[in-house]
Image (tube, helix red, strand yellow):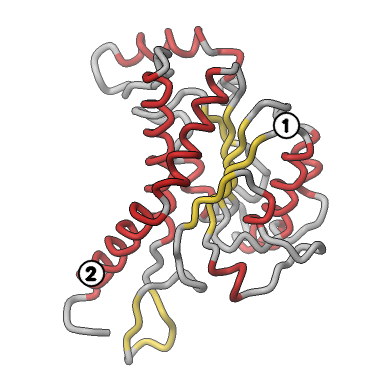
Amino acid sequence: MSDGTPADLFFDAAIGLLQRVREEEAEAISAAGTLLADTVAAGGRLFAFGAGHSSLAAQDVVYRAGGLALMNLLAVPGVVGVDVIPATLGSALERVDGLASAVLDTSPLRAGDTLVIISLSGRNALPVEMALNARALGVRVVGVTSVAYATETSSRHSSGTFLRDHCDIVLDSKIAVGDAELTLDTIPAPFAPASTVVTSALMQAMMATAAAALADRGIEPPLLRSGNVDGGHDWNGRVMTEYGDRIFYRH
């Protein structure tokens, strides 16, 4: 590690990654945002899924002030965060064959919808099967993953494939295998993960693109406002009434 405090070095690393995805993923971000806008304009529904810490970026775009009201969380019990006890159960469930099929069979997903799947490694059975089976249902899939894992690790799915292999559009977070940006001679393991910062930025950039694309077509994007802003609750009530048939986090 070079000169600078660990905090400075982490910010440098995170900013560097954000600059990379801004430049290198611009086309993919535009395509993904346009796909979301296409889906909304055509009457489809939007869903996001992530397992473990990847779920944080999915949750960040659901029922969010300044975000599209139509983005729903596709939840898999025991997998959507570290709230399950023991936390290691979530990691184990990601490797269970058939779980994605059971989830999709009981979910509201249907042909014409778009599903954003977030998985840093993209190597476990759950995200791979989720993407593969969703596309078989006629659902469009956006994958947010680190493509490096597909070249530097082996798949844990029986097909030998990764999430990136079953997506209509892939957003590459550029995160190095292991998800740790810093090293110190006095610490035996690399530390300071940046995947949440970068993945959330990719998600929000995609959502912003979608909102603007809808507006360009003369469609008011169904955005939520903060409940802590005067008039926010009334605004949100109107949006949720108008789009209630495509919002599933209220039921």
Residue 155 in percent (x, y) is at 71, 68
Q: Is residue 133 depicted above or below 236 in this figure? A: below
Pick the quarter of the image with the C terminus. Answer: top right
The residue closer to the viewer here, 161 or 70, is 161
Which residue sits at x=61%, y=33%? 114
Q: Which residue is mark 1?
A: 107
- Residue at 27 percent of width and 61 percent of height: 15
Q: Say whether residue 195 is left or right of residue 117.
A: left
Circle 1: residue type: Ser
* Number of residue marks: 2
- Find disc 2 in the rendering and name its residue: 7
Q: Look at label 2 and name its amino acid.
A: Ala
Q: Residue, x 17% and y 78% (percent of image)?
A: 4
Position of 76 compared to 249: left or right?
right
Q: Give me the residue at 50% from left, 39% from top.
A: 32
Q: CA distance from mark 1 to mark 2?
A: 42 Å
Q: Identify the image quadrant of residue 47.
A: top right
Residue 94 appears at what percent x and percent y? 69, 57
Q: What secondary structure is found at the residue carrying circle 2?
A: helix
Q: Earlier in the sequence, mark 1 or mark 2?
A: 2
Label 2 CA crowd tier, 10 Å (few <14, some 14–19, many 20+):
few
Which percent across, then down, holds residue 16?
A: 29, 64
Q: Residue furthest left?
A: 4
| Vertical order, 30 against 175 (above or below) | above
